[in-house]
Protein backbone atom coordinates (compact mmCIF):
# COMPACT_ATOMS: atom_id res chain seq x y z
CA UNK A 1 0.00 0.00 0.00
CA UNK A 2 1.24 3.51 -0.78
CA UNK A 3 2.86 4.93 2.43
CA UNK A 4 0.46 7.85 2.83
CA UNK A 5 -2.49 5.49 2.35
CA UNK A 6 -1.05 3.20 5.01
CA UNK A 7 -0.97 6.12 7.47
CA UNK A 8 -4.58 6.86 6.57
CA UNK A 9 -5.56 3.23 7.12
CA UNK A 10 -3.91 3.37 10.54
CA UNK A 11 -6.02 6.44 11.36
CA UNK A 12 -9.11 4.49 10.36
CA UNK A 13 -8.16 1.58 12.54
CA UNK A 14 -7.55 3.95 15.48
CA UNK A 15 -10.96 5.50 14.79
CA UNK A 16 -12.47 2.02 14.86
CA UNK A 17 -10.82 1.22 18.21
CA UNK A 18 -11.99 4.51 19.69
CA UNK A 19 -15.56 3.66 18.65
CA UNK A 20 -15.52 -0.06 19.32
CA UNK A 21 -18.68 0.05 21.43
CA UNK A 22 -20.65 2.31 19.12
CA UNK A 23 -24.12 0.96 18.35
CA UNK A 24 -25.51 1.63 14.88
CA UNK A 25 -29.04 1.89 16.24
CA UNK A 26 -28.03 4.78 18.50
CA UNK A 27 -26.65 6.59 15.43
CA UNK A 28 -30.23 6.59 14.14
CA UNK A 29 -31.45 8.04 17.43
CA UNK A 30 -28.81 10.79 17.17
CA UNK A 31 -29.63 11.62 13.56
CA UNK A 32 -33.21 11.26 12.29
CA UNK A 33 -31.91 12.00 8.78
CA UNK A 34 -29.40 9.19 8.85
CA UNK A 35 -31.04 7.32 5.95
CA UNK A 36 -30.81 10.40 3.71
CA UNK A 37 -27.28 11.15 4.83
CA UNK A 38 -26.01 7.61 4.31
CA UNK A 39 -27.66 6.53 1.07
CA UNK A 40 -27.00 7.43 -2.55
CA UNK A 41 -28.62 6.85 -5.93
CA UNK A 42 -27.53 6.36 -9.51
CA UNK A 43 -29.89 6.12 -12.48
CA UNK A 44 -32.85 4.96 -10.39
CA UNK A 45 -30.85 2.53 -8.24
CA UNK A 46 -30.69 3.17 -4.48
CA UNK A 47 -27.79 2.19 -2.23
CA UNK A 48 -28.52 2.41 1.50
CA UNK A 49 -25.49 2.02 3.76
CA UNK A 50 -26.97 3.70 6.82
CA UNK A 51 -27.18 0.36 8.68
CA UNK A 52 -23.38 0.10 8.74
CA UNK A 53 -21.57 1.22 11.86
CA UNK A 54 -20.01 4.37 10.48
CA UNK A 55 -20.36 8.14 10.80
CA UNK A 56 -19.51 11.22 8.76
CA UNK A 57 -16.08 11.14 10.40
CA UNK A 58 -15.58 7.52 9.29
CA UNK A 59 -16.58 8.42 5.75
CA UNK A 60 -14.24 11.43 5.67
CA UNK A 61 -11.37 9.21 6.78
CA UNK A 62 -12.30 6.72 4.05
CA UNK A 63 -12.46 9.43 1.37
CA UNK A 64 -9.03 10.62 2.52
CA UNK A 65 -7.79 7.05 2.20
CA UNK A 66 -9.04 6.92 -1.40
CA UNK A 67 -7.27 10.22 -2.11
CA UNK A 68 -3.99 9.07 -0.54
CA UNK A 69 -4.20 5.79 -2.43
CA UNK A 70 -4.62 7.82 -5.65
CA UNK A 71 -7.82 6.07 -6.65
CA UNK A 72 -8.91 8.81 -9.04
CA UNK A 73 -5.51 8.86 -10.81
CA UNK A 74 -5.67 5.07 -11.11
CA UNK A 75 -9.23 5.28 -12.42
CA UNK A 76 -8.03 7.71 -15.09
CA UNK A 77 -5.29 5.24 -16.07
CA UNK A 78 -7.89 2.45 -16.23
CA UNK A 79 -10.23 4.36 -18.54
CA UNK A 80 -7.28 5.70 -20.59
CA UNK A 81 -6.41 2.12 -21.54
CA UNK A 82 -3.02 2.09 -19.79
CA UNK A 83 -1.50 -1.35 -19.22
CA UNK A 84 -2.56 -1.49 -15.55
CA UNK A 85 -2.48 -5.30 -15.61
CA UNK A 86 1.27 -5.12 -15.16
CA UNK A 87 2.11 -8.81 -14.77
CA UNK A 88 0.48 -9.57 -18.12
CA UNK A 89 1.34 -6.18 -19.62
CA UNK A 90 -2.25 -5.54 -20.67
CA UNK A 91 -4.80 -2.78 -20.56
CA UNK A 92 -8.09 -3.48 -18.77
CA UNK A 93 -10.80 -2.18 -21.03
CA UNK A 94 -13.97 -4.24 -20.71
CA UNK A 95 -15.73 -0.85 -20.40
CA UNK A 96 -15.07 -0.29 -24.13
CA UNK A 97 -17.32 -3.27 -24.91
CA UNK A 98 -20.28 -1.38 -23.44
CA UNK A 99 -19.27 2.08 -24.60
CA UNK A 100 -22.53 3.33 -26.10
CA UNK A 101 -21.36 6.95 -26.39
CA UNK A 102 -20.09 6.84 -29.96
CA UNK A 103 -16.78 8.17 -28.65
CA UNK A 104 -13.49 6.42 -29.50
CA UNK A 105 -11.64 4.28 -26.93
CA UNK A 106 -7.89 4.18 -27.41
CA UNK A 107 -5.62 1.27 -26.52
CA UNK A 108 -1.98 1.41 -27.64
CA UNK A 109 -2.79 4.42 -29.82
CA UNK A 110 -5.60 2.61 -31.68
CA UNK A 111 -9.35 3.22 -31.47
CA UNK A 112 -10.77 -0.20 -30.55
CA UNK A 113 -14.43 0.77 -31.08
CA UNK A 114 -14.68 -0.13 -34.82
CA UNK A 115 -13.59 -3.73 -34.11
CA UNK A 116 -15.91 -3.98 -31.09
CA UNK A 117 -18.89 -2.77 -33.12
CA UNK A 118 -18.09 -5.12 -36.00
CA UNK A 119 -18.04 -8.15 -33.68
CA UNK A 120 -21.21 -6.98 -31.89
CA UNK A 121 -23.01 -6.52 -35.23
CA UNK A 122 -21.88 -9.96 -36.40
CA UNK A 123 -23.08 -11.46 -33.13
CA UNK A 124 -26.42 -9.67 -33.47
CA UNK A 125 -26.93 -10.92 -37.03
CA UNK A 126 -26.03 -14.44 -36.00
CA UNK A 127 -28.26 -14.28 -32.90
CA UNK A 128 -31.23 -12.99 -34.90
CA UNK A 129 -30.71 -15.70 -37.53
CA UNK A 130 -30.60 -18.41 -34.88
CA UNK A 131 -33.69 -17.00 -33.18
CA UNK A 132 -35.64 -16.74 -36.43
CA UNK A 133 -34.54 -20.10 -37.81
CA UNK A 134 -32.68 -18.58 -40.77
CA UNK A 135 -29.62 -20.36 -39.43
CA UNK A 136 -30.75 -23.84 -38.43
CA UNK A 137 -29.49 -27.32 -37.60
CA UNK A 138 -29.92 -30.46 -39.68
CA UNK A 139 -33.34 -30.96 -38.10
CA UNK A 140 -34.52 -27.37 -38.53
CA UNK A 141 -34.73 -24.32 -36.21
CA UNK A 142 -32.44 -24.55 -33.19
CA UNK A 143 -34.43 -25.42 -30.09
CA UNK A 144 -31.43 -25.62 -27.73
CA UNK A 145 -28.10 -23.89 -27.26
CA UNK A 146 -25.32 -25.39 -25.18
CA UNK A 147 -22.65 -22.97 -23.94
CA UNK A 148 -19.48 -24.87 -23.11
CA UNK A 149 -17.06 -22.81 -21.02
CA UNK A 150 -15.79 -22.38 -17.47
CA UNK A 151 -14.97 -19.51 -15.08
CA UNK A 152 -15.58 -16.20 -16.81
CA UNK A 153 -16.63 -18.04 -19.97
CA UNK A 154 -19.49 -19.65 -18.03
CA UNK A 155 -20.42 -17.74 -14.89
CA UNK A 156 -21.35 -14.48 -16.65
CA UNK A 157 -23.60 -16.11 -19.26
CA UNK A 158 -25.15 -18.48 -16.67
CA UNK A 159 -25.82 -15.72 -14.15
CA UNK A 160 -27.16 -13.21 -16.68
CA UNK A 161 -29.33 -15.73 -18.54
CA UNK A 162 -30.89 -16.79 -15.23
CA UNK A 163 -31.29 -13.16 -14.12
CA UNK A 164 -33.09 -12.23 -17.32
CA UNK A 165 -35.27 -15.35 -17.34
CA UNK A 166 -38.51 -13.39 -17.85
CA UNK A 167 -37.03 -11.82 -21.00
CA UNK A 168 -35.87 -15.15 -22.45
CA UNK A 169 -37.71 -15.71 -25.73
CA UNK A 170 -34.97 -17.48 -27.72
CA UNK A 171 -34.04 -21.18 -27.76
CA UNK A 172 -33.51 -23.00 -24.47
CA UNK A 173 -30.00 -22.47 -23.08
CA UNK A 174 -27.86 -25.01 -21.27
CA UNK A 175 -24.46 -24.53 -19.70
CA UNK A 176 -21.73 -27.11 -19.37
CA UNK A 177 -18.64 -26.19 -17.39
CA UNK A 178 -17.39 -28.99 -15.12
CA UNK A 179 -14.93 -31.58 -16.45
CA UNK A 180 -17.01 -34.07 -14.46
CA UNK A 181 -18.69 -36.04 -17.27
CA UNK A 182 -21.98 -35.85 -15.39
CA UNK A 183 -22.31 -32.20 -16.35
CA UNK A 184 -22.32 -32.72 -20.12
CA UNK A 185 -24.06 -36.09 -19.89
CA UNK A 186 -27.10 -34.63 -18.19
CA UNK A 187 -27.38 -31.93 -20.86
CA UNK A 188 -26.92 -34.37 -23.77
CA UNK A 189 -29.78 -36.46 -22.34
CA UNK A 190 -32.14 -33.51 -22.75
CA UNK A 191 -31.34 -32.31 -26.26
CA UNK A 192 -31.88 -33.36 -29.86
CA UNK A 193 -28.61 -33.33 -31.83
CA UNK A 194 -30.38 -32.19 -34.99
CA UNK A 195 -31.66 -28.95 -33.42
CA UNK A 196 -28.84 -28.03 -31.00
CA UNK A 197 -26.22 -25.33 -31.41
CA UNK A 198 -23.01 -25.75 -29.38
CA UNK A 199 -21.11 -22.62 -28.45
CA UNK A 200 -17.57 -23.20 -27.26
CA UNK A 201 -16.64 -20.23 -25.08
CA UNK A 202 -13.00 -19.94 -24.12
CA UNK A 203 -10.75 -16.91 -24.16
CA UNK A 204 -7.65 -19.08 -24.64
CA UNK A 205 -9.28 -22.11 -26.31
CA UNK A 206 -6.90 -24.31 -24.32
CA UNK A 207 -8.72 -24.72 -20.99
CA UNK A 208 -8.77 -28.44 -20.13
CA UNK A 209 -12.35 -28.58 -18.89
CA UNK A 210 -13.76 -26.70 -21.86
CA UNK A 211 -11.78 -28.50 -24.54
CA UNK A 212 -12.66 -31.89 -23.01
CA UNK A 213 -16.36 -31.00 -22.99
CA UNK A 214 -16.17 -29.51 -26.50
CA UNK A 215 -14.57 -32.67 -27.86
CA UNK A 216 -17.18 -34.86 -26.16
CA UNK A 217 -19.97 -32.73 -27.64
CA UNK A 218 -18.31 -32.87 -31.06
CA UNK A 219 -18.03 -36.69 -30.96
CA UNK A 220 -21.66 -36.97 -29.84
CA UNK A 221 -22.85 -34.73 -32.65
CA UNK A 222 -20.72 -36.44 -35.31
CA UNK A 223 -21.94 -39.84 -34.16
CA UNK A 224 -25.55 -38.72 -34.55
CA UNK A 225 -25.34 -36.56 -37.67
CA UNK A 226 -21.95 -37.01 -39.33
CA UNK A 227 -18.87 -34.80 -39.59
CA UNK A 228 -20.62 -32.19 -41.74
CA UNK A 229 -22.81 -31.16 -38.77
CA UNK A 230 -19.84 -29.60 -36.96
CA UNK A 231 -19.43 -26.66 -39.30
CA UNK A 232 -23.14 -25.86 -39.03
CA UNK A 233 -23.85 -26.58 -35.37
CA UNK A 234 -20.79 -25.24 -33.58
CA UNK A 235 -19.84 -21.66 -32.87
CA UNK A 236 -16.86 -20.34 -30.91
CA UNK A 237 -16.11 -17.32 -28.74
CA UNK A 238 -12.43 -16.72 -28.23
CA UNK A 239 -9.38 -14.50 -28.57
CA UNK A 240 -7.58 -17.43 -30.26
CA UNK A 241 -9.32 -17.63 -33.63
CA UNK A 242 -6.53 -19.81 -35.13
CA UNK A 243 -7.44 -22.51 -32.60
CA UNK A 244 -11.18 -22.31 -33.28
CA UNK A 245 -10.69 -23.03 -36.98
CA UNK A 246 -8.38 -25.95 -36.13
CA UNK A 247 -11.31 -27.37 -34.11
CA UNK A 248 -13.45 -27.26 -37.28
CA UNK A 249 -15.52 -24.17 -36.48
CA UNK A 250 -16.37 -22.02 -39.49
CA UNK A 251 -14.78 -18.56 -39.52
CA UNK A 252 -18.16 -16.82 -39.71
CA UNK A 253 -19.25 -18.70 -36.57
CA UNK A 254 -16.19 -17.65 -34.55
CA UNK A 255 -16.61 -14.39 -32.63
CA UNK A 256 -13.46 -12.77 -31.32
CA UNK A 257 -12.45 -10.55 -28.46
CA UNK A 258 -9.17 -9.20 -27.15
CA UNK A 259 -6.54 -9.81 -24.49
CA UNK A 260 -7.52 -6.60 -22.67
CA UNK A 261 -10.83 -8.26 -21.70
CA UNK A 262 -10.25 -10.30 -18.54
CA UNK A 263 -12.11 -13.64 -18.38
CA UNK A 264 -14.22 -12.57 -15.39
CA UNK A 265 -15.03 -9.26 -17.13
CA UNK A 266 -15.99 -10.84 -20.46
CA UNK A 267 -19.79 -11.10 -20.32
CA UNK A 268 -19.93 -7.82 -22.30
CA UNK A 269 -17.90 -9.34 -25.16
CA UNK A 270 -18.57 -12.20 -27.58
CA UNK A 271 -18.75 -14.39 -24.44
CA UNK A 272 -22.25 -12.92 -24.04
CA UNK A 273 -23.48 -14.63 -27.24
CA UNK A 274 -25.62 -17.25 -25.48
CA UNK A 275 -27.29 -14.44 -23.49
CA UNK A 276 -27.81 -12.44 -26.68
CA UNK A 277 -29.45 -15.42 -28.40
CA UNK A 278 -31.62 -16.03 -25.34
CA UNK A 279 -32.96 -12.50 -24.88
CA UNK A 280 -32.26 -10.92 -28.28
CA UNK A 281 -29.72 -8.28 -29.37
CA UNK A 282 -31.92 -5.34 -28.31
CA UNK A 283 -32.09 -6.47 -24.70
CA UNK A 284 -28.40 -7.35 -24.78
CA UNK A 285 -27.76 -3.71 -25.78
CA UNK A 286 -29.90 -2.54 -22.85
CA UNK A 287 -27.75 -4.71 -20.57
CA UNK A 288 -24.63 -3.01 -21.99
CA UNK A 289 -26.29 0.41 -21.58
CA UNK A 290 -26.90 -0.20 -17.87
CA UNK A 291 -23.22 -0.95 -17.38
CA UNK A 292 -22.22 2.05 -19.51
CA UNK A 293 -24.38 4.32 -17.32
CA UNK A 294 -22.43 3.05 -14.29
CA UNK A 295 -19.10 3.64 -16.07
CA UNK A 296 -20.11 7.27 -16.56
CA UNK A 297 -21.38 7.57 -12.99
CA UNK A 298 -18.16 6.06 -11.64
CA UNK A 299 -16.03 8.56 -13.58
CA UNK A 300 -18.04 11.66 -12.78
CA UNK A 301 -19.93 11.38 -9.48
CA UNK A 302 -18.27 12.95 -6.43
CA UNK A 303 -16.89 10.39 -3.96
CA UNK A 304 -19.74 10.80 -1.48
CA UNK A 305 -22.33 10.03 -4.20
CA UNK A 306 -20.25 7.53 -6.14
CA UNK A 307 -21.73 4.09 -5.61
CA UNK A 308 -18.71 1.92 -6.52
CA UNK A 309 -16.52 4.19 -4.40
CA UNK A 310 -18.90 3.93 -1.44
CA UNK A 311 -19.25 0.15 -1.81
CA UNK A 312 -15.48 -0.26 -1.94
CA UNK A 313 -14.71 2.05 0.97
CA UNK A 314 -17.33 0.46 3.20
CA UNK A 315 -15.81 -2.91 2.26
CA UNK A 316 -12.35 -1.63 3.23
CA UNK A 317 -13.74 -0.36 6.54
CA UNK A 318 -15.19 -3.78 7.29
CA UNK A 319 -12.20 -5.78 6.05
CA UNK A 320 -9.24 -3.71 7.20
CA UNK A 321 -10.45 -1.69 10.18
CA UNK A 322 -13.10 -3.99 11.64
CA UNK A 323 -11.33 -7.23 10.64
CA UNK A 324 -14.33 -9.00 9.12
CA UNK A 325 -13.21 -11.92 6.94
CA UNK A 326 -16.18 -12.60 4.72
CA UNK A 327 -18.77 -10.68 2.80
CA UNK A 328 -22.22 -12.07 2.06
CA UNK A 329 -24.28 -11.15 -0.99
CA UNK A 330 -27.94 -11.93 -0.39
CA UNK A 331 -30.22 -11.27 -3.34
CA UNK A 332 -33.90 -11.12 -2.44
CA UNK A 333 -34.50 -11.87 -6.08
CA UNK A 334 -34.71 -15.47 -7.21
CA UNK A 335 -33.59 -14.51 -10.70
CA UNK A 336 -30.26 -13.43 -9.19
CA UNK A 337 -29.66 -16.88 -7.72
CA UNK A 338 -26.29 -17.22 -9.51
CA UNK A 339 -25.20 -13.65 -8.74
CA UNK A 340 -23.20 -14.59 -5.60
CA UNK A 341 -21.38 -17.32 -7.55
CA UNK A 342 -20.62 -14.82 -10.30
CA UNK A 343 -19.32 -12.30 -7.76
CA UNK A 344 -17.13 -14.94 -6.15
CA UNK A 345 -15.01 -15.13 -9.30
CA UNK A 346 -15.21 -11.40 -9.96
CA UNK A 347 -14.07 -10.45 -6.47
CA UNK A 348 -11.96 -13.35 -5.25
CA UNK A 349 -10.06 -14.04 -8.48
CA UNK A 350 -9.41 -10.29 -8.74
CA UNK A 351 -8.51 -9.34 -5.19
CA UNK A 352 -7.43 -12.61 -3.59
CA UNK A 353 -3.81 -11.45 -3.71
CA UNK A 354 -0.95 -11.22 -1.20
CA UNK A 355 1.67 -9.45 -3.32
CA UNK A 356 1.41 -5.79 -4.27
CA UNK A 357 2.04 -4.25 -7.69
CA UNK A 358 5.71 -3.72 -6.87
CA UNK A 359 6.17 -7.40 -6.00
CA UNK A 360 6.24 -6.93 -2.22
CA UNK A 361 4.07 -8.88 0.24
CA UNK A 362 1.19 -6.75 1.49
CA UNK A 363 1.01 -6.02 5.23
CA UNK A 364 -2.76 -5.74 5.40
CA UNK A 365 -5.73 -7.91 4.51
CA UNK A 366 -6.98 -7.96 0.92
CA UNK A 367 -10.14 -9.49 -0.60
CA UNK A 368 -12.63 -11.15 1.76
CA UNK A 369 -14.35 -14.47 1.13
CA UNK A 370 -17.47 -13.63 -0.87
CA UNK A 371 -20.46 -15.92 -0.60
CA UNK A 372 -24.23 -15.94 -0.53
CA UNK A 373 -27.54 -17.42 -1.54
CA UNK A 374 -30.88 -15.90 -2.36
CA UNK A 375 -33.15 -14.79 0.47
CA UNK A 376 -35.41 -16.09 1.84
CA UNK A 377 -33.80 -19.53 1.49
CA UNK A 378 -30.66 -18.33 3.26
CA UNK A 379 -32.80 -17.30 6.25
CA UNK A 380 -33.65 -20.96 6.80
CA UNK A 381 -30.04 -22.08 6.45
CA UNK A 382 -27.17 -19.85 7.54
CA UNK A 383 -28.77 -16.66 8.91
CA UNK A 384 -28.61 -18.18 12.41
CA UNK A 385 -24.85 -17.65 12.26
CA UNK A 386 -25.18 -14.16 10.79
CA UNK A 387 -27.50 -13.13 13.64
CA UNK A 388 -25.96 -14.91 16.61
CA UNK A 389 -22.65 -16.46 15.56
CA UNK A 390 -19.22 -15.33 16.73
CA UNK A 391 -18.21 -13.91 13.33
CA UNK A 392 -19.60 -10.64 12.09
CA UNK A 393 -20.55 -10.87 8.43
CA UNK A 394 -21.23 -7.69 6.52
CA UNK A 395 -23.90 -8.36 3.93
CA UNK A 396 -25.36 -6.78 0.81
CA UNK A 397 -29.11 -7.20 0.39
CA UNK A 398 -30.51 -6.76 -3.13
CA UNK A 399 -34.19 -6.20 -3.73
CA UNK A 400 -36.42 -4.99 -6.58
CA UNK A 401 -39.23 -2.53 -5.88
CA UNK A 402 -41.36 -4.48 -8.32
CA UNK A 403 -41.28 -8.08 -9.52
CA UNK A 404 -40.89 -8.48 -13.29
CA UNK A 405 -43.72 -11.00 -13.17
CA UNK A 406 -45.75 -10.39 -10.00
CA UNK A 407 -47.59 -13.30 -8.36
CA UNK A 408 -50.19 -12.43 -5.70
CA UNK A 409 -48.54 -10.86 -2.65
CA UNK A 410 -45.31 -12.87 -2.98
CA UNK A 411 -43.24 -9.80 -3.70
CA UNK A 412 -44.50 -7.83 -0.71
CA UNK A 413 -43.69 -10.82 1.51
CA UNK A 414 -40.22 -11.04 -0.01
CA UNK A 415 -39.60 -7.34 0.57
CA UNK A 416 -40.91 -7.52 4.14
CA UNK A 417 -38.44 -10.33 4.82
CA UNK A 418 -35.51 -8.38 3.38
CA UNK A 419 -36.34 -5.26 5.41
CA UNK A 420 -36.97 -7.35 8.53
CA UNK A 421 -33.60 -9.05 8.27
CA UNK A 422 -31.55 -5.87 7.88
CA UNK A 423 -33.45 -4.28 10.75
CA UNK A 424 -33.05 -7.33 12.99
CA UNK A 425 -29.33 -7.52 12.20
CA UNK A 426 -28.87 -3.89 13.16
CA UNK A 427 -31.25 -3.50 16.10
CA UNK A 428 -30.93 -6.97 17.66
CA UNK A 429 -32.83 -7.85 20.82
CA UNK A 430 -31.53 -7.09 24.31
CA UNK A 431 -31.65 -9.47 27.26
CA UNK A 432 -34.00 -7.09 29.02
CA UNK A 433 -36.41 -7.25 26.09
CA UNK A 434 -36.15 -11.04 25.94
CA UNK A 435 -36.84 -11.37 29.65
CA UNK A 436 -39.88 -9.12 29.59
CA UNK A 437 -41.29 -10.99 26.55
CA UNK A 438 -40.85 -14.34 28.29
CA UNK A 439 -42.36 -13.00 31.52
CA UNK A 440 -45.35 -11.68 29.57
CA UNK A 441 -45.92 -15.24 28.33
CA UNK A 442 -46.12 -16.41 31.95
CA UNK A 443 -42.82 -18.34 31.90
CA UNK A 444 -41.34 -18.88 35.36
CA UNK A 445 -38.17 -17.11 36.55
CA UNK A 446 -35.92 -20.21 36.47
CA UNK A 447 -36.89 -21.04 32.92
CA UNK A 448 -36.34 -17.40 31.90
CA UNK A 449 -32.80 -17.48 33.37
CA UNK A 450 -32.01 -20.57 31.34
CA UNK A 451 -33.58 -19.48 28.09
CA UNK A 452 -32.91 -15.74 27.96
CA UNK A 453 -29.22 -15.80 26.85
CA UNK A 454 -30.10 -18.00 23.87
CA UNK A 455 -32.74 -15.58 22.68
CA UNK A 456 -30.59 -12.43 22.78
CA UNK A 457 -29.57 -10.89 19.43
CA UNK A 458 -26.48 -8.71 19.75
CA UNK A 459 -27.43 -6.62 16.70
CA UNK A 460 -24.96 -4.05 15.38
CA UNK A 461 -24.34 -6.30 12.36
CA UNK A 462 -23.74 -4.24 9.22
CA UNK A 463 -25.77 -4.48 6.03
CA UNK A 464 -26.11 -2.45 2.84
CA UNK A 465 -29.25 -2.58 0.72
CA UNK A 466 -29.52 -2.08 -3.01
CA UNK A 467 -32.99 -1.33 -4.28
CA UNK A 468 -33.76 -1.16 -7.99
CA UNK A 469 -37.08 -0.57 -9.76
CA UNK A 470 -37.24 -4.00 -11.45
CA UNK A 471 -34.67 -6.54 -12.64
CA UNK A 472 -34.49 -5.44 -16.28
CA UNK A 473 -31.49 -5.94 -18.60
CA UNK A 474 -30.47 -2.31 -17.90
CA UNK A 475 -30.57 -2.84 -14.13
CA UNK A 476 -28.62 -6.09 -14.37
CA UNK A 477 -25.94 -4.25 -16.35
CA UNK A 478 -25.83 -1.60 -13.62
CA UNK A 479 -25.48 -4.14 -10.81
CA UNK A 480 -22.65 -6.07 -12.46
CA UNK A 481 -20.72 -2.91 -13.37
CA UNK A 482 -21.11 -1.52 -9.84
CA UNK A 483 -19.44 -4.59 -8.36
CA UNK A 484 -16.75 -4.56 -11.08
CA UNK A 485 -15.76 -1.00 -10.17
CA UNK A 486 -15.99 -1.75 -6.46
CA UNK A 487 -13.38 -4.45 -7.04
CA UNK A 488 -11.25 -1.95 -8.98
CA UNK A 489 -11.33 0.64 -6.18
CA UNK A 490 -10.44 -1.90 -3.52
CA UNK A 491 -7.57 -3.26 -5.63
CA UNK A 492 -6.36 0.33 -6.17
CA UNK A 493 -6.35 1.00 -2.42
CA UNK A 494 -4.66 -2.30 -1.59
CA UNK A 495 -2.19 -1.54 -4.40
CA UNK A 496 -2.57 -5.00 -5.92
CA UNK A 497 -3.12 -6.08 -9.52
CA UNK A 498 -6.81 -7.02 -9.66
CA UNK A 499 -6.55 -8.27 -13.23
CA UNK A 500 -4.20 -11.26 -13.19
CA UNK A 501 -4.92 -14.70 -11.67
CA UNK A 502 -1.65 -16.57 -11.17
CA UNK A 503 -3.17 -18.38 -8.22
CA UNK A 504 -5.12 -20.69 -10.51
CA UNK A 505 -2.04 -21.95 -12.34
CA UNK A 506 -0.33 -24.35 -9.92
CA UNK A 507 -3.34 -26.63 -9.61
CA UNK A 508 -3.69 -26.72 -13.41
CA UNK A 509 0.00 -27.66 -13.80
CA UNK A 510 -0.19 -30.43 -11.22
CA UNK A 511 -3.42 -31.79 -12.73
CA UNK A 512 -1.52 -32.06 -16.03
CA UNK A 513 1.32 -33.95 -14.32
CA UNK A 514 -1.02 -36.22 -12.41
CA UNK A 515 -3.27 -37.22 -15.30
CA UNK A 516 -0.90 -39.95 -16.61
CA UNK A 517 -0.48 -41.15 -13.02
CA UNK A 518 -4.26 -41.34 -12.53
CA UNK A 519 -4.59 -43.11 -15.87
CA UNK A 520 -2.06 -45.68 -14.64
CA UNK A 521 0.49 -44.84 -17.33
CA UNK A 522 3.02 -43.60 -14.77
CA UNK A 523 3.82 -44.36 -11.11
CA UNK A 524 3.39 -41.61 -8.48
CA UNK A 525 7.16 -41.73 -7.88
CA UNK A 526 8.59 -38.85 -5.90
CA UNK A 527 5.22 -37.51 -4.76
CA UNK A 528 4.31 -37.03 -1.11
CA UNK A 529 2.83 -40.04 0.66
CA UNK A 530 -0.66 -38.53 0.80
CA UNK A 531 -0.95 -37.99 -2.96
CA UNK A 532 0.80 -41.31 -3.69
CA UNK A 533 -1.45 -43.07 -1.16
CA UNK A 534 -4.57 -41.56 -2.72
CA UNK A 535 -3.42 -42.63 -6.21
CA UNK A 536 -2.85 -46.19 -4.96
CA UNK A 537 -6.20 -46.25 -3.16
CA UNK A 538 -7.91 -44.92 -6.30
CA UNK A 539 -6.49 -47.75 -8.43
CA UNK A 540 -7.23 -50.35 -5.75
CA UNK A 541 -10.85 -49.22 -5.35
CA UNK A 542 -11.51 -49.43 -9.08
CA UNK A 543 -10.42 -53.10 -9.33
O1 LIG B 1 -9.84 -20.01 -13.66
C1 LIG B 1 -8.88 -19.34 -14.39
C2 LIG B 1 -9.39 -18.79 -15.68
O2 LIG B 1 -8.27 -18.37 -16.40
C3 LIG B 1 -10.39 -17.67 -15.51
O3 LIG B 1 -9.82 -16.45 -15.28
C4 LIG B 1 -11.13 -17.75 -16.79
O4 LIG B 1 -12.33 -17.05 -16.71
C5 LIG B 1 -11.30 -19.24 -16.92
O5 LIG B 1 -10.08 -19.78 -16.45
C6 LIG B 1 -11.62 -19.76 -18.29
O6 LIG B 1 -10.61 -19.48 -19.21
P1 LIG B 1 -10.87 -19.56 -20.76
O7 LIG B 1 -11.95 -18.60 -21.11
O8 LIG B 1 -9.57 -19.21 -21.41
O9 LIG B 1 -11.29 -20.98 -21.09
Image (tube, helix red, strand yellow):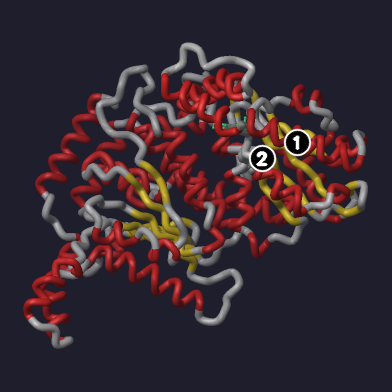
Tell me: residue 213, above or below residue 161: above
Can you identify the residue that label 1 sits on?
216
Across and down, in percent, residue 356 comes to 35, 23
Across and down, in percent, residue 327 comes to 35, 48
Across and down, in percent, residue 220 comes to 81, 40
Label 2 CA crowd tier, 10 Å (few <14, some 14–19, many 20+): some
Tell me: residue 238, above or below residue 391: above
Circles 1 and 2: CB distance less than 8 Å? yes
Tell me: residue 247, above or below residue 271: above
Tell me: residue 385, above or below residue 451: above
User: How many labels were placed on the picture?
Assistant: 2
Which residue is painted at 31% across and 21% down in the image?
361
Instruction: Give the quarter of the figure containing the C terminus.
Output: top right
Which residue is painted at 52% across and 46% down in the image?
342
Horizontal relation, residue 420 to residue 24: left or right? right
Instruction: Give the quarter of the figure containing the N terminus.
Output: top left
Distance from the alpha carbon under mark 1 to that under mark 2 = 9 Å
- Which of 189/475 is in front? 189
Identify the residue at the far left of this view.
445
Q: Quadrant of residue 15?
A: top left
Amino acid sequence: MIDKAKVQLEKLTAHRHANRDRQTKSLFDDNPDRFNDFSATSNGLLFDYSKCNLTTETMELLFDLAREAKVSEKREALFAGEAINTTENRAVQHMALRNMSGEPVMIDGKDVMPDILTVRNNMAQFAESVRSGKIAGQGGKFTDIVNIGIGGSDLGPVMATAALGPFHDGPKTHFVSNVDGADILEVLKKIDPATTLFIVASKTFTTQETMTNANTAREWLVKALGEEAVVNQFAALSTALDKTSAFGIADDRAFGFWDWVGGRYSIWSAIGLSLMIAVGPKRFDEFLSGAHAVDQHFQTAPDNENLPMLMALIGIWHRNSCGYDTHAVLPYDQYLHRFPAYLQQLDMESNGKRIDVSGQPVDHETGPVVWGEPGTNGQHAFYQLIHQGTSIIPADFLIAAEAVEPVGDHHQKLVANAFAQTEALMVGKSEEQVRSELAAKGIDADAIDKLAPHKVFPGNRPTCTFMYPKLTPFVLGQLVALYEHKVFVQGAIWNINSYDQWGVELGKELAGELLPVVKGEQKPTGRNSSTAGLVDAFHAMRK
